Image (cartoon, coloured by chain):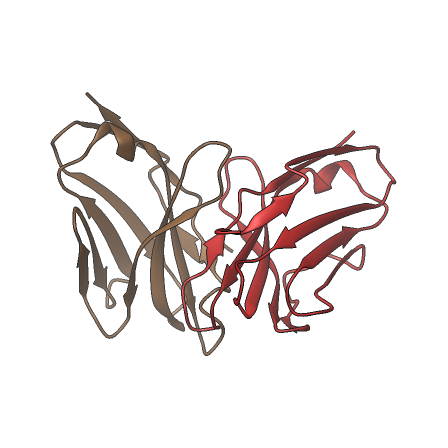
Amino acid sequence: DQQVKQNSPSLSVQEGRISILNCDYTNSMFDYFLWYKKYPAEGPTFLISISSIKDKNEDGRFTVFLNKSAKHLSLHIVPSQPGDSAVYFCAASGGGTSYGKLTFGQGTILTVHP
Amino acid sequence: GAGVSQTPSNKVTEKGKYVELRCDPISGHTALYWYRQSLGQGPEFLIYFQGTGAADDSGLPNDRFFAVRPEGSVSTLKIQRTERGDSAMYLCASSLMANTEAFFGQGTRLTVV
């Protein structure tokens, strides 16, 4: 079963506007959530994370929101830039295991148009 | 080096052959992870090392897959009797400790023909 789901395979946004990427999870043991960005022919690059004790974490243009009751998190990118075009993966870990043992979503392809 | 290094970057092998994939983690990182990513999917966890020992190998699909990290640094993922279904991108990641973020290498693309 897919414990972490990204239901939008792709998202297209105009440069300067907000990009919102969504992620849902089913395992209530998850307590740490991360977003990774991946360019073609490269490995995933860590972007931002959030612990389950918080509902928001901000880092420059990137903000992650966590709604534990809905088991939902989102990544906001403001303003979006063409260089942000990549595949974005949501990932989760928890249950007392290592933060590097991650369950990933399927990914969302973000395209930011100039 | 500055980042996680994986070699080779590409590997083509014939069905039934044995392959080894190498991972050099970031210097000083005690935790090391192997993932497999199929086309259109997110990475799937295979195995996690803390130091020299495999702390969690629950993601290894079957006994054809094996990984070692004998000195607590470099790791090798070994696949015996390769099958076409093993074709995927194999990713390695490392983290300073178990409770810190993992950094990924660029991956090894394995193709079994």
Tell whether A39 sits left or right of B47.
Answer: left
> Which quadrant holds residue A25?
bottom left
Residue at 39% in and 50% down? A5
Q: Where residue A38 sits in the image (x, y, percent)?
A: 41, 40
> Residue B40: in sight, yes or no?
yes
Tell whether B75 sits left or right of A106.
Answer: right
Q: Where residue A95 sits in the image (x, y, percent)?
A: 45, 76
Which image quarter holds the C terminus of chain A? top left
Q: Where residue B49 sits in the image (x, y, percent)?
A: 62, 69
Colour chain A is painted in: brown
Q: Nearer the viewer, residue B81 or A48?
A: A48
Q: Which chain is red?
A: B
Query: Above or below — where is A47 with respect to A82?
Result: below
Q: Where residue B113 sits in the image (x, y, percent)?
A: 79, 29
Q: Nearer the viewer, residue B65 or B97?
A: B97
> Which quadrant holds residue B18?
top right
Query: Above or below — where is B106 with respect to A69?
Result: above
Residue at 66% in and 67% down? B57
Q: Nearer the viewer, residue A79 or A27?
A: A79
Residue at 76% in and 57% down? B62
> Residue A2: in sight, yes or no?
no
Query: Above or below — where is A96 with respect to B100?
Result: below
Residue at 72% in and 39% down? B85
The residue lying furthest to the top in this view is A114
Query: Above or below — where is A113 with respect to A92?
Result: above
Tell whether A35 sits left or right of A18.
Answer: right
